[in-house]
Image (cartoon, helix red, strand yellow):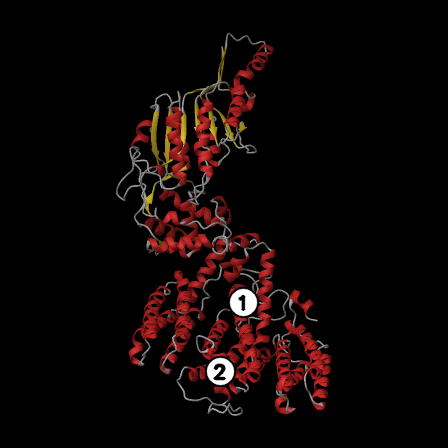
Amino acid sequence: MFRFVGLRGNDYGPRDGVAAAPVLLRALMASNTQPEAVTMVRKPIVLITGAAGDIGSALSRALERDYTVVGLDRRGKKAAIPLIGVDLTSAESIDKALGEFETQYGRHIASVIHLAAYFDFTGEDNPLYDEVNVGGTRNLLGALQRFEVEQLVFSGTMLVHEPCAPGERIDESRRIAPKWPYPRSKAAAEEAIRLHHGHMPYVLLHLAGVYDERRCVPTLAQQIARIYERDVKSYLYSGNPDAGQSFLHKEDMIDAFRRAVDRRAELPPDAVILLGEPETIGYDALQDELGLLIHGEAEWTTLRVPKTAARVGAAVEAKLEPVIPDALDRGEKPFIRPFMIAMADDHYALDITNARRLLGWEPRYRIADVLPKLVQTLKADPHAWFRANGITPPAWIAVAEKRGEDVEDIRTRHEAVFRAAHSAHLWAPFFNIALGIWLLVSPPLIGLTSRALVVSDIVSGAALIVFAALSLSWRLAWARWVCAAIGAWVMSAPILFWAPTAAGYLNDTLVGVLVIGFAVLVPPEPGVSPLAATTGPTTPPGWSFNPSAWTQRLPIIALALVGLHVSRYLAAYQLGHVDGVWEPFFQGGPDPKNGTEEIITSSVSQAWPVPDAGLGALTYLMEIATGVIGSRRRWRTMPWLVLLFGLMIAPLGIVSIFFIVIQPIWIGTWCTLCLIAAAAMLVQIPYSLDELVAGCQFLLRRKRAGRPLLRVFLFGDTDDGKAEPDTPEFERSPREIVRDVVSGGVNLPWTLAISMLLGAWLMFTRLTLDASGAMANADHLIGSLVLTASVVACAEVARSVRFVNILFGLALLVTPFAYDAGAMHMAASVVCGLALIALALPRGVVKGRYAGWDRYIV
């Protein structure tokens, strides 16, 4: 007698052994074998919804040796088992799919395992929760009523239960109290099963967070990713650090499903079983373990954040998402949502007595034992790990993978260099702590009488001590930016509150700028991505020099110092700290004030809510600070700073030129010091433009390469070309240094030099030609604009700006006829206009190369 047991449908056709029987009998007869009997035993059928998913596929593989496994999933999905397409939200679709199943496999089903469900971690009540999880379950139950189903196994979650406190455990009798839409939909689906299961016995498996050596639940995956990246959020937590949740290894989960199917005849008809590891690791302990595994740090600093502050932060981040979707979360929605803050104290430790008793099940894996393998998988291929866990990799990881760089080597190398630089400059945060103490005690020592300034200094000093102390840790580099912001406020306070004494003004100005210097001017550069810091060129691709070199920034800083001292002197008069200001040339009106005093107390100046000269001094200070921050690669490591630096110079230059234009026209006099400051400001503009162009070119290249623009703008990136050694700029002869300072990207063709002289001459036709009225005003305005355009055109990247002088030349040909001008004035205006037109035509010498910008230098 021959017995054929468990013939597989995949080998012999869709109807398993039944369809194969005639074929086998014919084969036996052809071999002259005379069997006394042939017994066909078909394997029991298991129907799995969501069979094409990761868990469904693993479960199918575990069951297919002893069962005929058939899957239901969305149309278009692929699986290694027979798969029938279905839409669970449609009762008609389910009836049709099960009709197809019935035709091929009959009406008897050993077990229906219902895995299919909708899930997201937004916390929003998506309609799909009701349509798929609840309605889909109800539709499935209705369609199964005509079948002989020995068992329905439902994949649920432990989150349907009310959480417990650390030290307690949850069992199946725990109250059903889900807190957010996903577990609420699961609880509603279970209630539908209780009401509509009909003749089918059912098993509700309440699963803990599933993981394996490569993937894990979103909460754990995000926690690992934050620590790996040293994200600021990895140091913050708003819940009970002893609270935690149970985990469940995927193989243990598959084993439990298998046992539930195998014991279907023995289980109660309405079984509820919690599945998870009984040992639970608290959040704080898990942080420390991950810090040790990823970074070799035995204790990971986790700061407790008040829930109110955490809710506000999460809400702000969620609100900013439509505006700046890839600012900090790489184009994906922020993971931390306000609803999660309320659940930070939830503890899920499980009592698995029921699983042991009914299934004979005991977890073979422990999360503490598997974590090292999970982290090892991350380090071996960070990009693949992030993708596998549904997290968009940081930009620097994606680019490193694309360039064939070793991601883990980049991270560890950057970390080592960063830590070494931080350790070498620990004196800086200690100095800021000392400055914070000085702000606390200085008000009575310097006789500060302004209550607003006293409160500002005390609050700023206390905050500075806290954040400077935090910045002692290299892991908390973000605290350095907070210190810099405090320094900027301290500098601004004397202007905002009209400091009544020179000592108060001087004290806050000096302390503020020192705080900024000690916070962010000393190495290492905070906020730069590892890829930007460790790879990429120093000189922009296609450029003949580096626009971020110190020799390029020194002229700007030196000129800003000139403007700073002038502005502070004028602000002292506006604040009442000095009785008069120096003015060698221009007299004021009939009152005792000279020209400078008239200007800085005019209606234009008084229209500002703060001393306008003090505001200018503050801007010069910030300009100096932003000019010093960053390395020679800052055009790509800190593009936000380059843009800020350029934008501060350009608007300040425009304001300075505006004030120079209106002085004789509106106020009727001049200010010698204002002219000096305006000249210093104007000369800065051509020196700043090349770095601005390089930074914009870099951002455009990265955008074309598919990188998230805002993230590159904030944290920098690598660029085309190999890394270059960072050679010290000042280890050269003084002659070479001076040559680079004077000539790099800026030169003065003779045509522009003459144009500048003509512009300056036009500004003073009141003196040279005894001009008056509208004609004098027109000359002054045109002369100011000619001088501005000619100075800006000295920058090789802005050489084309010289063509604007053609328009001004044409204007000079018209103005003598439009206004009352004498013969000499008319001749001078015409000659000057023709000269400007002619001088604007030659380009002059251009020594540098500027990649794609060269075509605009005509």
- Could you tell whether 177 is left or right of 817 in the image? left
Secondary element type, mark 1: helix
Q: First in sequence: mark 1 or mark 2?
A: 2
Secondary element type, mark 2: loop
In the rendered image, residue 100, in percent from the top left (x then y), is placed at 54, 22
Mark 2, residue position:
602
Name the front one of labels 1 and 2.
Answer: 2
Disc 2 marks a residue whose amino acid type is Ser
Q: Nearer the viewer, residue 582 or 561?
A: 582
| Neighbours of disc 2 within 10 Å: few (<14), some (14-19), many (20+) | some
- Could you tell whether 739 is left or right of 520 in the image? right
Report the residue at 61% width, 91% height from top. Answer: 767
Report the residue at 43% width, 82% height from top. Answer: 574
| Neighbours of disc 1 within 10 Å: few (<14), some (14-19), many (20+) | some
Q: Which mark is residue 643?
A: 1
> Relative to 255, is 718 above or below?
below
Disc 1 marks a residue whose amino acid type is Leu
In the rendered image, residue 578, in percent from the top left (x then y), is placed at 41, 87
- Could you tell whether 299 is left or right of 99 in the image? left
State the CA–CA distance, disc 1 to disc 2: 33 Å
Q: Nearer the viewer, residue 651 or 748?
A: 651
Q: Nearer the viewer, residue 129 or 725?
A: 129
In the rendered image, residue 252, in percent from the top left (x then y), is placed at 39, 34
State which quarter of the image contains the C terminus: bottom right
